[in-house]
Amino acid sequence: MSILITAANSASAYKLKNQLNSDNIIMGDHMDLPDFMLKPGKLIRLPDPKSVSYTHEMLTLCLDMGVEAIYLFRQTEIDLLLKAQILFNEYNIKILVEGNEL
């Protein structure tokens, strides 16, 4: 199983990645990321929180990638996914808040 860390273009996300010290960490961001960063495979483009189906897109992504925990950094992601925490819990996916808006 994997851990997803959002806000992959931030230093805080990389600091958390180093603290967790796991091989099963996926970094992701909905903000624009250069293509060269996406190709290695451990960095992915996340759904945009502005999408009306954001919660379901994130749930699908987590299920497809075997994610068991999501560390959120941005307030928009936090607000939307915490409202759906019960849904994510049904699939044994933990939603964890890390830090404040970047």
Image (spheres, grey):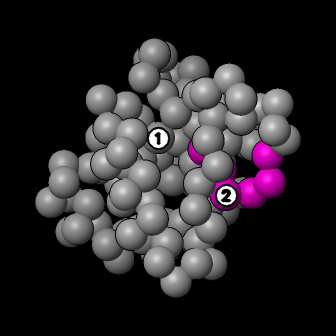
Q: Position of residue 9 (x, y in %)?
A: 75, 43
Amino acid type shown at disc 2: His
Residue 4, disc: 1
Q: Position of residue 92 (x, y in %)?
A: 19, 49
If the image is split into quadrants, where does the C terminus sit?
bottom right
Residue 77 in which image quadrant: bottom right
- Nearer-N-terminus badge (1/2): 1
The one nearer the camera, 50 or 65, is 65
Q: Which quadrant of the figure has residue 37?
A: top right
User: In this rendering, does residue 50 appear at all?
Assistant: yes
The residue furthest bottom is: 52
Q: How many marks?
A: 2
Side (left or right) of 92 relative to 20? left
Would you place residue 23 above or below residue 25 in this image? Answer: above
Give the amino acid type for the residue marked by disc 1 in the picture.
Leu
Residues shaded magenta: 28-33
Residue carrying label 2 = 30
Position of residue 1 relative to residue 65, above or below, is: above
**Which percent across, then down, holds residue 67?**
35, 40
